[in-house]
Image (cartoon, rainbow, N blue to C red):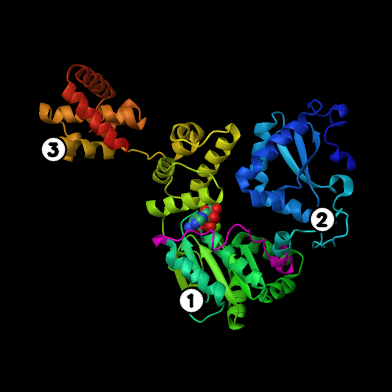
Amino acid sequence: MTSSLAVDDGLHDDGTSGFLPGEITRGWARVAAALPARVGEREFETWLRALAPGACDGDELTLTLPSPFLRDWVRGHHGDLIESLVRAEMPGVARVIFGVAPRPGGAISGTRPAVAVASEAAIVQAAPSPQQAAAIRSVTNDLAAPLDERYTFDSFVVGKPNEFAYACARRVAERPSSPGFNPLFLYGGVGLGKTHLMHAIGGELTRSGRVSVAYMSAEKFMYRFIAAIRSQSTMEFKEQLRSVDVLMIDDLQFLIGKESTQEEFFHTFNALVDAGKQIVVSSDKSPSDLSGIEDRLRTRLGCGMVADVHATTFELRMAILSAKANSAQVSVPPKVMEFLAHKITTNVRELEGALNRLIARAKLVGAPISIETVPEVLHDILRAHDRRLTIEEIQKRVAEHFHIRLTEMTSQRRARAVARPRQVAMYLAKQLTGRSLPEIGRRFGDRDHTTVMHAVTRVQQLMETDATFAEDVELLRRMLES
Ligand code: ADP
Ligand code: MG
């Protein structure tokens, strides 16, 4: 086990690793240098600073942390990111394993008290930082998931689409179990800040130190419930649940169709509300749209405060980007932010991810972020968000442009006044949609693919000889692409 702490020496001698002396150290140094930009300086200092490379066995690299608690946290919150960075920076490593090992040099065995972490056979317990201690406190009865320190009310950017949900969340954090606000039901699309608000409520209440908070995903709830059944400890599970002051269940839609778990949740829910405890629930659907959730549960869920987190607006996305750039202390040109806010419209997490990538990249190459580098750095994200242009949209726009009826796009009329626009639409469909010639033909009134081919060549010829026509087509193309 101690050999797993050997960083540089001996690793390559066992014949199992293809790494040369120093390679692991250097590779890991690159990963560690890239991490703060990806997770934030504070997160890095709080949780990731203690990460150390251990043994490399074949293509499997072990990374160690000083306690099981830290290991679980880091694996759960940043495992995927760390693995992808390791893969990128240390070719030859295919998998990362997180282990526990005392810090080299016994630096942690000083005078600070150790913290016992539930039921794990810890090798050495590192003393937690204040932030870690707060996270541990929130793990009520070893029941709930830790709260993410970054998700606070302060770091939540408020705009029209989310101001109501925000106000409700604040209100619950200030005065839990107020009549009319229990349960608080937050709903809205993916990546719009529901989990963020729940953690903010939990964090605020935990810091106040007056109440015990349990936050968990509905999936975790179910998993715990099933585990309790298996180990015949459902009574204990129920008692634990019912002992908290505030219970927050995230992504309730996960319980759709899971009847016995719903039943259990329903009873817990009733017991807690009857005892004057606060419930906060999130879901991607409103209570009335949660088909597959029992009627009586849906009714109860909807009888407190139901707050919809709406899709973001351009203004809100700009505000979020500038807040994130500010807190990362990076200057991001407004043009870049506008570009991102236009392109990535549905999910704040992806918006954030794109910005983080630009920031990380700029730091890596030591150059400021500029609009020129955006497409290169974000090509995969942008491609996924490129609006899928349909043949119908093209037909509609072209028909409007040439003042002909939409039905002419599929009609058999061959008069020039309708045949030419139809050809232009076929040409644009070929250029902009990636559909095959036969498919395009089918959508234009069941025409043959040779007709489409002919239209494409004809339009190209005309564009070369007729400047006005070429301008027209270009204008249409730009309109469709924007
Ligand atoms: P949901 O739970 O609704 O799917 P999350 O709460 O996980 O969404 O949000 C996804 C990411 O976007 C998080 O990192 C969160 O901090 C961020 N985010 C979402 N909305 C906002 C906002 N209004 N202000 C700041 N960050 C936000
Ligand atoms: Mg969520």
Residue at 27%, 37% in the rendered image? 479
Residue at 48%, 66% in the rendered image? 166
- Is residue 111 on the magenta stretch? no
Helix, strand or loop at mark 2: loop
Residue type at the position of mark 3: His
Residue 67 lies, with reference to residue 80, above or below; the image says below
Q: Distance between the residues labelled 3 and 1?
A: 53 Å
Residue 69 lies, with reference to residue 446, above or below; the image says below
**Residue 126 badge:** 2
Cβ at disc 3 under 8 Å from ligand 1:
no
Q: How far apart are marks 1 and 2 (CA)?
A: 43 Å
- Most foreground residue, 399 or 48: 48
Residue 395 lies, with reference to residue 352, above or below; the image says above
Mark 3 — residue? 403
On-image quarter of the C terminus: top left
| Mark toward the start of the polypeptide (3 vs 2) | 2
| Mark toward the start of the polypeptide (1 vs 2) | 2
- Is residue 138 on the magenta stretch? yes
Q: Position of residue 64 (x, y in %)?
A: 79, 45
Q: Residues within 10 Å of mark 3 (few under 14, many from 20)?
A: few
Residue type at the position of mark 1: Gly
Q: Do the residues labelled 1 and 2 touch (CB within 8 Å)?
A: no
Q: How crowded is mark 1: few (under 14 residues within 10 Å), some or many (20 or more)?
A: some
Mark 1 — residue? 304
Residue type at the position of mark 2: Ala
By secondary structure, the bulk of the magenta-drawn segment is best described as: loop
**Residue 214 badge:** none
Helix, strand or loop at mark 3: loop
What range of the chain is rendered magenta?
Answer: 136-161
